């Protein structure tokens, strides 16, 4: 029996706990003069730059006292952002665009995380068992691939990555399940391949699985795929808070890029990884500014894959940082 997938708790994160509001926008000023701001994230290594920025005082420098609360998924965060229960939160770009397509009032505030251009350094890969007949990406069409959810990042990027390699992605069946269940499904033969992101990617390698596709990088190299969002109402009523968050997040991402050793420490203390795993995981790219071009790239792909019914007016969705 191969080493079982650890960190099941990471795939079933804490339920969303909504904070009591001190004003109509849930904001109040502390005795230290800082504005208290709750930011919702999920249990992911890509949350570590946010924790790092808090630790290093970047948000305090911008007048914010940030408290991070954990939700079970980005999809759970989006409604709480829209209805005003949380001012700012994280969700991946496909989830954001799907919510906007359903009529929800979401604005992109800051870039959270993305990928580079080297497939071997990708935080996201499709794996098969070592003795699988699947030798490369050309063998994936017609197979069953486990993804954590359908009509989302996995089944949007895998077809694009295959097409970019000159491969027709027709006939793939995407099977939704928790990351913690994928190893068992692969070994039982319930699926032919599994899509894993860090830290599960590193554990998949420990299990002896073989990567055959780096879907994020091979679909959209050097692109941003995670964003911090707010509601249109909050952005309109609190432009100074949004601007302060943007500035602090830029400082955090820039510092994180240069200090991955500190991200590894936070992956243990805040995300809950074992030290052994945290020492070996790959981190993504943490852009500064607001990457609007990547939103458009993913929007086109989401439309092609039937996740959204039409492309939105991208200019109306972003809150451009003040220079």
Image (cartoon, grey):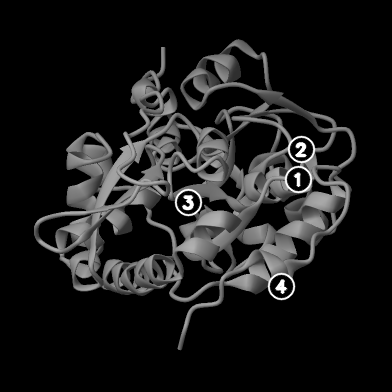
Counting from the top left corner in percent of width and height, residue 215 is at 64, 51
Residue wearing tag 4: 315
Dot 1 and dot 3 residues touching (CB under 8 Å):
no
Residue at point 55%, 31% (across, down)? 130
Q: Please report whichever mark, 2 or 4, sits nearer to the chain's N-terminal start.
A: 2
Element under disc 1: loop
Residue at point 23%, 51% (across, down)? 264
Q: CA distance from mark 2 to mark 3?
A: 20 Å
Residue wearing tag 2: 140
Residue wearing tag 1: 103
Counting from the top left corner in percent of width and height, residue 204 is at 45, 33
Counting from the top left corner in percent of width and height, residue 257 is at 32, 70
Dot 2 and dot 3 residues touching (CB under 8 Å):
no
Q: Residue at the far left: name it.
A: 31
Badge 3: few (under 14), some or many (20 or more) residues near its Cα, within 10 Å?
many
Q: Residue at the far bottom: name it.
A: 323
Element under disc 3: loop
Residue wearing tag 3: 123
132 left or right, relative to 71 = right
Badge 2: few (under 14), some or many (20 or more) residues near its Cα, within 10 Å?
many
Q: Nearer the viewer, residue 27 or 313?
A: 27
Please state which of the two labelled residues, at mark 1 or mark 3, is closer to the viewer: 1
Badge 1: few (under 14), some or many (20 or more) residues near its Cα, within 10 Å?
few
Please state which of the two labelled residues, at mark 4 or mark 3, is closer to the viewer: 4
Quadrant containing the N terminus in the rendered view = top left
Q: CA distance from mark 2 to mark 4?
A: 36 Å
Task: Please tell me whether residue 7 is drawn above or below residue 246 in the rendered image.
Answer: above
Q: Please report whichever mark, 4 or 3, sits nearer to the chain's N-terminal start.
A: 3
């Amino acid at each position: 029996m191969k080493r079982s997938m650890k960190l099941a708790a990471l795939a079933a994160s804490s339920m969303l706990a909504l904070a009591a509001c001190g004003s109509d926008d849930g904001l109040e000023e502390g005795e230290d003069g800082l504005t208290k701001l709750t930011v919702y994230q999920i249990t992911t290594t890509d949350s570590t730059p946010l924790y790092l920025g808090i630790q290093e005082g970047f948000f305090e420098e911008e007048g914010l006292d940030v408290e991070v609360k954990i939700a079970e998924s980005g999809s759970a965060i989006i409604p709480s952002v829209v209805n005003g229960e949380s001012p700012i939160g994280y969700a991946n770009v496909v989830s954001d665009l799907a919510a906007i397509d359903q009529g929800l009032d979401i604005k992109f505030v800051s870039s959270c995380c993305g990928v580079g251009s080297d497939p071997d350094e990708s935080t996201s890969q499709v794996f098969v068992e070592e003795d699988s007949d699947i030798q490369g990406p050309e063998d994936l069409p017609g197979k069953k691939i486990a993804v954590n959810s359908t009509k989302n990042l996995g089944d949007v990027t895998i077809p694009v990555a295959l097409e970019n390699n000159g491969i027709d992605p027709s006939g793939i069946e995407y099977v939704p399940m928790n990351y913690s269940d994928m190893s068992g499904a692969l070994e039982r033969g319930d699926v032919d391949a599994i899509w894993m992101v860090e830290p599960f990617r590193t554990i998949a390698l420990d299990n002896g699985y073989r990567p055959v596709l780096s879907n994020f990088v091979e679909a959209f190299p050097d692109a941003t795929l995670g964003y911090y969002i707010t509601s249109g109402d909050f952005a309109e009523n609190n432009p100074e808070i949004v601007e302060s968050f943007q500035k602090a997040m830029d400082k955090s991402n820039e510092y994180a890029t240069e200090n991955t050793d500190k991200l590894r420490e936070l992956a243990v203390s805040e995300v809950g990884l074992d030290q052994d795993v945290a020492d070996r995981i790959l981190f993504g790219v943490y852009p500064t500014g607001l990457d609007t071009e990547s939103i458009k790239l993913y929007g086109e792909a989401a439309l092609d894959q039937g996740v959204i019914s039409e492309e939105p007016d991208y200019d109306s969705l972003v809150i451009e940082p003040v220079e």
